[in-house]
Image (cartoon, rainbow, N blue to C red):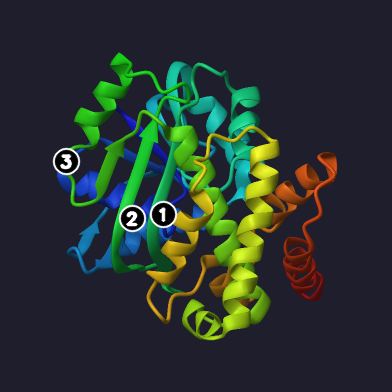
Amino acid sequence: MKILIVGAGAVGGYFGARLIEKGEDVTFLVREKRKQQLLEDGLVVESKHGDVSVIPQVITAADQGSFDVVLIGTKAYHLDQAIDSVKPFVHSKTIIIPMLNGIAHIEQLQQAFSKEQVMGGLCFIESTVTADGIIQQTSGIHHFLFGELDGQATERLKQLEDVFSGTKGKFKASNSIMSELWNKYLFITAMSGVTTLFQQPIGPILELEEGQEVIKTVINEITQVMRAEGAPIAEEVEAEQYGRFIALDYKMKSSMQRDMEKGAPVEVDHLQGYLLKKAQHHKIETPVLKSIYVNVKLYEKSRS
């Protein structure tokens, strides 16, 4: 299968490199500046799971071609542009798999392409791109989950399993991808929220009893909103999510926190903002979530 990855950043670049390392037919759709960097210096990954350095196939929006699978590895604030760029490379049977956090992008992609073409996808990875374009992946977690939105074990899902198998990244098919998406959305929204609000890694926050209370409260607020939306999350999800916080490395930061430290754009409207709109619709009070949102929006204002 011919695979197109939109973006060669910390997520798409990492998993794309692992697929190339295995021998799959992978092309990156990137901007001209990144194209020249990749052609001159290669796609370089530094990882505890093994380093990779390859000269990848790269195209820009001005090129032509057709692909069987499109993995969208951009940030949410670049999704509109990514959709416009990728449309010329998509045929009626092309499978679209987003690698974004959150949930709002699913409907946006279905509207841009079709409900049949869009699968669910999500990643668990701690990685970043250095100023000179090197992808650094630093933790033991490098998982990519994918699956049909209705949970069916289709033939094309089996084909993708074959394509993704045997890599040094952990690609796994899921028959409950919507549940996986909502659960990660809950965790990433709470994690990015408290670490940006307090401007600290998770360890120092958990050391304080009051910090623990804030984490539990925001998890509860988010859970209330998600349940009102009919999200497929378990009864014990709050305890499970808090347990994930307890298990984190002391120095663990959220990607949103790292972006703010670099003065980069953030996905606050896609994550916290989307849930706040849903909370208002369902008349649910979410004071901690609202405080988190205001804090990041003030950061955005300072950037502009």
39 vs 25, left or right, is right
Label 1: state its secondary structure: loop
**Mark 3 lies on residue:** 23
Q: Amino acid at mark 2?
A: Tyr
Mark 2 vs 1: CB contact within 8 A: yes
Residue found at x 81% / y 54%: 285
**Mark 2 lies on residue:** 14
Work out whether 165 lies above or below 134: above
Q: Residues within 10 Å of mark 1 (few under 14, many from 20)?
A: many
Label 2: state its secondary structure: helix
Spatial distance from mark 2 to mark 1, Cα to Cα?
5 Å
**Mark 1 lies on residue:** 11
Mark 3 vs 1: CB contact within 8 A: no
Q: Quadrant of residue 145?
A: top left
Where residue 28 appears, as percent x and y from the top left, is: 40, 44
198 vs 73, left or right, is right
